[in-house]
Amino acid sequence: MKELTPRQIVAELDKYIIGQADAKRCVAVVLRNRYRRQQLDEIMQEDVQPKNVIMIGPTGVGKTEIARRLAKLVEAPFIKVEATKFTEVGYVGRDVESIIRDLVETSIRMVREEKMEQMREKGAAAADLHLLNILAPLPSKHRKAAASNPFSAFWGGNNEDNEEVESSNDYEKQKEKERELRQHRVKMRQVLANGELDNEMVEIEVEENQAPVFGLSDGMDEMGMNMQGILGSIMPKKKKKRKVSVAEARKILTQEEAEKLIDTDEVNSLGIKCAEQSGIVFIDEIDKIAGKDGGHGPDVSRGGVQRDILPIVEGCTVMTKYGMAKTDHVLFIAAGAFHLTKPSDLIPELQGRFPLRVELDSLGEEELRRILMEPKNSLVKQYCELMEVDGVDLEFADSGISAIAQFADKVNRNTENIGARRLHTILEKVLEDYLFEAPEANFGKVVIDRQLVERKLAEITQDDDLSRFIL
């Protein structure tokens, strides 16, 4: 984050999202301010609150993608939630505090993966040693008692002189056998390291995953308690034997050994801290809970949801199964189309917690054409790679791309405007026959030009009813 200036953040977002310059500038400044805050002294840090953002714009213009790419850019814990999923207490729906619990879960998973990566080398070494002990075990150092009769200790009659002679002979044989086994282990270690045994089958013991107690664990998690963890610490872990290849066994054992090296308490503590200081929550469809309550039907709890969300956004402490998590410095980005409502329809207290508002532009024909071609791993590149798997050399001519963008823009204007998502629908319709027949047919090279696009879509676009239901 230290190296990313707002201009560089916008440049990174430009690789994936076309247009929406105002929204990109807004979130870039918000993100840089988080880094600036972390450089202040601790007393000042507590007083600097994050500036939450509301994105206003129709569906399919890049609201969610901006937030998701932003989080990935700085490797911050990120979750996306739908505002309509939550209801006020007393109605059927999720508790709003589960937003923060999910964020903490995501954060802890990220920290655990980072720690696992750090311990992977040590875990791999321990896994190789484990495999070596299975394939070429060392002799046991604990020899059986010399007395053949287990009751001889009580009945007497031990012949100590004979035992000493036998013991001396056995010791020499044991030393020789051990020497041979150690030489064999040295050779086996080298063979394992070279991967020559990767396809051989081996039997290993792995921990058996405990099935959650149905109806109990989920409810407890909602209250911030890990009932499964409590039961797991009391009950001994079951192990089961699996027969797998040496390569697969190495992966499984490396994972297990690396997990043993990780301090779970440290991971949980770092995960909560990371969620508190760097977490990003994207609340979609916030316009659906705006407006006054109707008093009946599905609208009955809209105001209640806003009041429940308010303390989370304002800053409170939420109980999770890993400990207490504060939301004072979590960044909230809300988004909505606001077709039938407007941000001022939210309750005043919630409006005040989203001081930054940015409007995203609708996508026209030119933007849709650029979306097809310019982003990293664009739709055109994706379909070319997918078809190449079946031996089809797919090529999109400029005229074909322009035609697809033109049809998408036309359908968006005549029916519901779903933005760039319309491109998925039209591309699937244009390529439908090739996608279906490619494994059996030998198409060779296929060029998608304007004539082909118009031929595929002619019947649908001429009939308004068909266009409305199919495109």
Image (tube, rainbow, N blue to C red):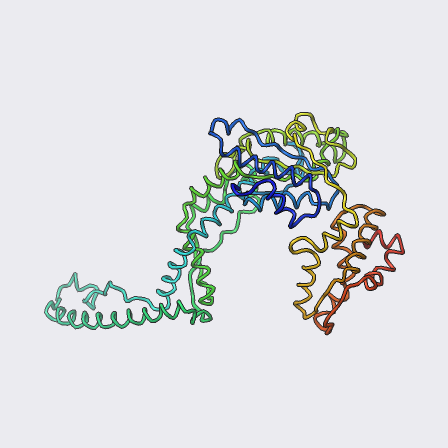
Q: Which one is nearer the viewer's eye here, 335 or 82?
A: 335
Corner quadrant of residue 374? bottom right
Q: Which one is nearer the viewer's eye here, 468 or 378?
A: 378
Q: Which one is nearer the viewer's eye here, 267 or 142?
A: 267
Q: Looking at the image, which residue is at 83% across and 46% down?
A: 413
Quadrant holding the C terminus: bottom right
Residue 107, how many percent across, how many down? Answer: 52, 43
Residue 344, how many percent across, how many down? Answer: 73, 28
Q: Looking at the image, which residue is at 72% across and 74% down?
A: 442
Q: Looking at the image, which residue is at 83% across and 52% down?
A: 469
Count of numbered badges drawn on the protein: 0
Q: Is residue 353 above or below residue 105?
A: above
Q: Is residue 145 left or right of residue 92?
A: left
Residue 380, how many percent across, how many down? Answer: 71, 59
Corner quadrant of residue 76? top right
Q: Which one is nearer the viewer's eye here, 224 or 36?
A: 36
Residue 429 in view here: no
Residue 375, how many percent across, how many down? Answer: 67, 53
Q: Looking at the image, which residue is at 65% across and 47% down?
A: 14
Q: Is residue 201 left or right of residue 296?
A: left
Q: Residue furthest left?
A: 161
Residue 414 in view here: yes
